[in-house]
Amino acid sequence: MSTAILSRIRELMKNVGYKSRPIQALIVTNHDAHMSEYLADCDRRLEYVSGFSGTAGVAIITEDEANMWTDGRYFIQAAKEMDSNWKLMKLGVHGTPTEGAWLTRKLKEGDLVGTDPRLIPYPVWLNLESELVHSGITLVPLSINFVDEIWKDRPSLDNKAIKSLDINYAGETSASKVKRVWKIMKEKSADIVVLSALDDIAWLLNLRGQDISYNPVFFSFLVITANELHLYIDEQKITESIKHHFKQDNFPIEFHPYKSIYSSLENMVNDIKKVWICRSASFEIYKTFPESKRVCECSPIAVMKAVKNEVEVQGMINAHIKDGVALCRYFAWLEKSMADNIELTEISAAKVLENFRKEEADYIGPSFHTISSTGPHAAITHYIPKPASDRALSLNEIYLCDSGAQYLDGTTDVTRTVHFGTPTEFQKNCFTRVYQGVVAIATAKFPYGIKGNCLDSFARKPLWDVGLDYKHGTGHGIGSYLFVHEGPMGISWRPYPDDPGLQPNMFLSDEPGYYHEGEFGIRIENIVQIVPAKTAYTMRTSELNFLTFTTITMCPIQTKMLDINLLTDLEINFLNDYHKKIQNTLGPILKERGFTDVYRWLEKETAEIVNYKN
């Protein structure tokens, strides 16, 4: 129970507060100092106080209430994980107030709301501050983190090594990338850029780490000036090999203690005219500089990183081919095991998938915790199987597996939903409509630079037609041996604030779904690459170029879950072409490696389906 934790926090709110004044509300975010989506154990403050382990949420604690806001991906999970001390606030549901609206109703003029300014993005702070000020409520930065004060057994941060990423995988030297950044800085008249996003730093410097599970990054800040770089990092990580990595490019870089970033920035204030502060920066960094000196825009690294170079493109394709071999082995094994009545659980099955991936070249590890879910667990969008909840796979239930891998040459993320017995007509109808959404995105043609949210309804229409929907985005960007969720673009009903517009060689997921709470869940997820489109006509008065997607994920879609009568010719042809591509790509590899049974399974799963309506 969270009773004791809340009691101790409320004591600090009353007795320590802000500058000897009690605070009436405490905000606990689900961020680290870098606004990472996935957190190291030492940064799981929201989970510590509330029990909620999802990646998106914010808690507000007052003298007599404890509320936690999260989005539709986590409604079911949060309700299961939090105890009776907590109230779940369902973001996006009619009647649910925003955090700011709730605070203005709950508190009175003169009250204080506190939070750690190092753990909240500055745009979130500014929006909340402007909402509260109209009611005479003040948002204040706390110098002490109240959760850390009471978290006596808080995990320590391991000092894990970092390594350089070879040019054969990176495709561009760090020096070349930095020169591009310097050019952008000049265009913006920025004297320095402050980087806090860990994937930005790792990509720019061609370094990878292991400070956060599944994410090959390392805790650091990077300040880029007009002629040198300053890396704030645990200096034990800077080995001779890392120094050599920078010397190879005659790289102008200095190293500083990780925790000295804030004092260093304070010392720079008087010496610079303009500082580029990225939108992912904390309020602590933002408030260091006066408004007249700030350039507040999306990180210059974000778009550079999102548009893959030729080496990264080929690496992503190669990674998905390797992943396809492991996935085909897994689903072939799974189908045979279920037919042979071998007892399997969500956890035991997921371990086999990871073992198959380990046999592939340049495999590093999973890109996130495998969502191996059956029956009602599949309706929990980001379900993580644990020993206490581990459920046996069944011939009578849908099995959803969302998994991914980190390879030196690319990151993967794939979801397949299968049934080992006989699906119901309703399940087939839902699956078919989800598949139609996948095809709608994969075959879309759109102008260069269009925002990703413009495509979102394409995927939802088949479900909307029968009154169904899903409570998550349709697609996210994906890194190259980096974060499995990468910005700044994406496909969602909500616009991405820094979406630069879709461009060739961006990679995104295509993953509509449907979730029937308490019974089953369905999701199909492929990774797609943006490529030039062939169109019937060209606008003579415009230089407008059109784009489309090509699917690089290599894993069959289970055809027995489809209601063929609902499919159009385009949807049938797409599946046949996609399956033929998989067969032609993976078939020779499976044969060469002696996976005869898997090859036969692949032949069966990719067999052409016939349009019975013709």
Image (spheres, rainbow, N blue to C red):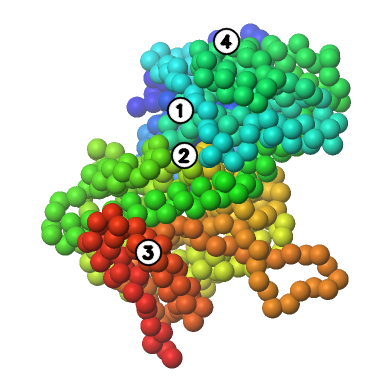
Residue drawn at 23 percent across, 44 percent down: 348
Q: Nearer the viewer, mark 1 or mark 2?
A: 2
Which residue bears the numbered disc 4? 16
User: Number of callouts in the render?
Assistant: 4
Quick one: SS at disc 2? Answer: loop
Residue receiving disc 3:
556
Is residue 87 placed above or below 536 in the rendered structure? above
Residue 204 visible, this orientation: yes
**Can you identify the residue that label 2 sits on?**
408
Q: Residue at x 83, y 73 (%)?
A: 540
Q: CA distance from mark 4 to mark 2?
A: 48 Å
| Residue 397 spot, x, y in % from top left | 26, 60
Residue type pointed to by label 3: Pro
Q: Quadrant of the C terminus?
A: bottom left
Please tell me which of labels 1 and 2 falls first in the chain. Answer: 1
Q: CA distance from mark 1 to mark 3?
A: 32 Å
Can residue 89 be seen from the camera position used here? no
Amino acid on which the number 4 mark rests in the picture: Val
- Nearest to the eye among marks 4 and 3: give it: 3
Mark 4 vs mark 2: which is more N-terminal? Answer: 4
Please indicate whether residue 529 sits to the left or right of residue 497 in the image: left
Element marked by disc 1: loop
Label 4: how many Cα within 10 Å (few below 14, some 14–19, many 20+): some
Q: CA distance from mark 1 to mark 2?
A: 13 Å
Q: Residues within 10 Å of mark 1 (few under 14, many from 20)?
A: some
Badge 1 amino acid: Gln
Quadrant in which the N terminus is drawn:
top left
